[in-house]
């Protein structure tokens, strides 16, 4: 019920919007392209806010920071259906190597060795400087007549040297104190003893995960049932991929469902990560135009619910290339994109309380999460490169070709990030700025 209330309003709205877009002609007035460009620029700013927030949450140490940067860069350099899952798996193996297989200890030893060499070099340099200035040890010898002439002997202290008094300490045994008078010794005896402060080392990210107290919640999904669900899911996943690959001319409905099923399976964390993947699975296939994709992308940011509802919009537009009605392809897209996450989440409820005890699992998930966050920055880059629409370039060009769109993206980012303006309002402001640009330039 909660899932339906969360997803249904946005998916129904996107389906209705797809029906309207499917009736739009191939050529639009120039002011509409200006409006769409402003909406796209604001959308890029909103997704950049999401990327920033996710990065702040997942970066816990230098290795996760490096994974986010490397994943973002690698995602910008190449694109393929299998590429994103491979990047996330490599990110997970990186944290496992760092946390468990000795990578962290090797880095510490390397840092320690580098520090020792720096100290040796600094001491060598300071020693050479001292010899050049003539500040040698023999010039400080008091037996040297030149030094003895300039030395002043301080007057001797007539008071007796302090005596060591051993006082009992209730918590830590006998403690030796130096006192100079009976008054001081009396005050010292009556002074309360303060126990020493013992520094506490902060746990590592993996240790903090594995040492969390076990939840007392009793889950209703048995372990065996969870394993059966996982096996059944991956069996169906492989079956759909094999059918699509082996059929000479697979139906477009099967191809659509398989693409959405694959996208829902390999995307870890959802959110903006799914956007460039859906573009590869629909626009690159020739089912949806780049213009209609960007139009739906701008609108989905203002709709309630998850970004996965975008699949309903794209699937409904795909019906123009099939004999099936739009409602059928929309349902196929909805079921295909949401089924993997719901199935795996239900199955993981039964086994996560068991596997979370193993450092390997928690370390692997930490790296996969960091890799997914890096791919959000990839989404920001790819959308930036296709956000500017004109009648001559309906497939989109870079927003950087017109400085005004950079201002639109910056306005949306600053407004949402620092002034907490809702995303829908920020995107609407971007559309208005696009119309202003058209009125000024045209």
Image (cartoon, rainbow, N blue to C red):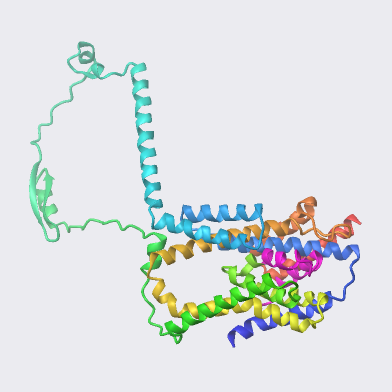
Q: Is residue 175 visible?
A: yes
Q: Residue at x 43, y 66 (%)?
A: 362
Residue 135, image quadrant: top left
Quarter where residue 232 is shown: bottom right
Q: Residue 230: x and y, percent?
A: 51, 78
Q: Is residue 121 above or below residue 259?
A: above
Q: Main secondary structure of the magenta part?
A: helix
**Is residue 437 a member of the stretch shown in magenta?**
no
State the image coordinates of residue 274 (x, y, percent, origin top left).
65, 67
In-front residue for pair 411/377: 377
- In this rendering, is residue 178 above or below 294? above
Residue 420: tell me if it is visible: no
Q: Is residue 228 left or right of residue 432?
A: left
User: Would you say 227 lies left or right of 403 here?
Assistant: left
From what the image shows, is residue 348 above or below residue 139? below
The structure residue drawn at horizontal position 53% and vertical position 77%, both measured from the top left corner, is: 344
Rendering coords of residue 234 (x, y %): 55, 75
With respect to residue 282, does 159 lie above or below?
A: above
Q: Residue at x 31, y 58 (%)?
A: 200
Task: Report the number of numbered marks.
Answer: 0
Task: Tell me the quarter of the image containing the C terminus.
Answer: bottom right
Q: Is residue 289 magenta?
A: yes
Residue at the outermost top position: 145
Range shown magenta: 275-304
Image position, residue 267 (x, y; %):
60, 68
The residue drawn where x is 82% and y is 81% is 323
Question: Quarter of the image containing the N terminus?
Answer: bottom right
Q: Is residue 83 left or right of residue 172?
A: right
């Amino acid at each position: 019920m909660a899932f339906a209330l969360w997803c249904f309003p946005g998916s129904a709205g996107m389906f209705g919007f797809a029906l309207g877009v499917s009736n739009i002609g191939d050529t639009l007035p120039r002011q509409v392209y200006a409006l769409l460009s402003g909406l796209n620029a604001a959308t890029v700013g909103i997704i950049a806010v999401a990327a920033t927030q996710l990065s702040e949450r997942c970066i816990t140490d230098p290795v996760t920071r490096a994974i986010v940067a490397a994943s973002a860069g690698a995602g910008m350099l190449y694109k393929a259906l299998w590429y994103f899952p491979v990047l996330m798996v490599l990110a997970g193996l990186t944290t496992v190597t760092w946390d468990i297989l000795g990578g962290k200890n090797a880095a510490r030893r390397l840092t320690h060795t580098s520090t020792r060499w720096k100290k040796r070099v600094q001491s060598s340099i300071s020693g050479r400087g001292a010899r050049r200035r003539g500040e040698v040890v023999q010039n400080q010898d008091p037996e040297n007549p030149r030094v003895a002439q300039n030395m002043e002997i301080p007057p001797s202290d007539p008071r007796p040297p302090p005596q060591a008094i051993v006082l009992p300490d209730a918590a830590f045994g006998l403690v030796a104190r130096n006192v100079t008078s009976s008054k001081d010794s009396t005050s010292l005896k009556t002074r309360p003893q303060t126990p020493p402060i013992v520094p506490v080392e902060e746990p590592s990210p993996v240790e903090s995960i594995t040492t969390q107290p076990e939840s007392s919640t009793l889950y209703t999904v048995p372990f065996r049932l969870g394993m059966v669900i996982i096996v059944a899911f991956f069996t169906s996943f492989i079956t759909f991929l094999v059918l699509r690959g082996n059929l000479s001319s697979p139906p477009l409905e099967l191809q659509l469902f398989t693409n959405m099923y694959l996208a829902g399976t390999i995307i870890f964390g959802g959110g903006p990560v799914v956007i460039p993947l859906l573009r590869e699975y629909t626009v690159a296939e020739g089912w949806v135009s780049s213009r209609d994709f960007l139009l739906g992308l701008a609108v989905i940011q203002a709709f309630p619910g998850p970004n996965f509802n975008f699949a309903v919009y794209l699937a409904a537009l795909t019906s123009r290339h099939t004999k099936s009605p739009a409602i059928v392809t929309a349902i196929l897209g909805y079921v295909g994109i949401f089924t993997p996450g719901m199935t795996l989440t239900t199955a993981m409820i039964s086994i996560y309380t068991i596997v979370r005890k193993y450092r390997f699992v928690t370390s692997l998930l930490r790296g996969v999460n960091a890799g997914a966050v890096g791919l959000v920055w990839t989404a920001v880059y790819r959308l930036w490169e296709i956000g500017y629409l004109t009648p001559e370039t309906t497939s989109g060009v870079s927003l950087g070709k017109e400085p005004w769109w950079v201002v639109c993206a910056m306005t949306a980012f600053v407004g949402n990030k620092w002034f907490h303006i809702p995303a829908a309002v920020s995107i609407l402001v971007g559309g208005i700025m696009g119309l202003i640009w058209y009125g000024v330039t045209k």
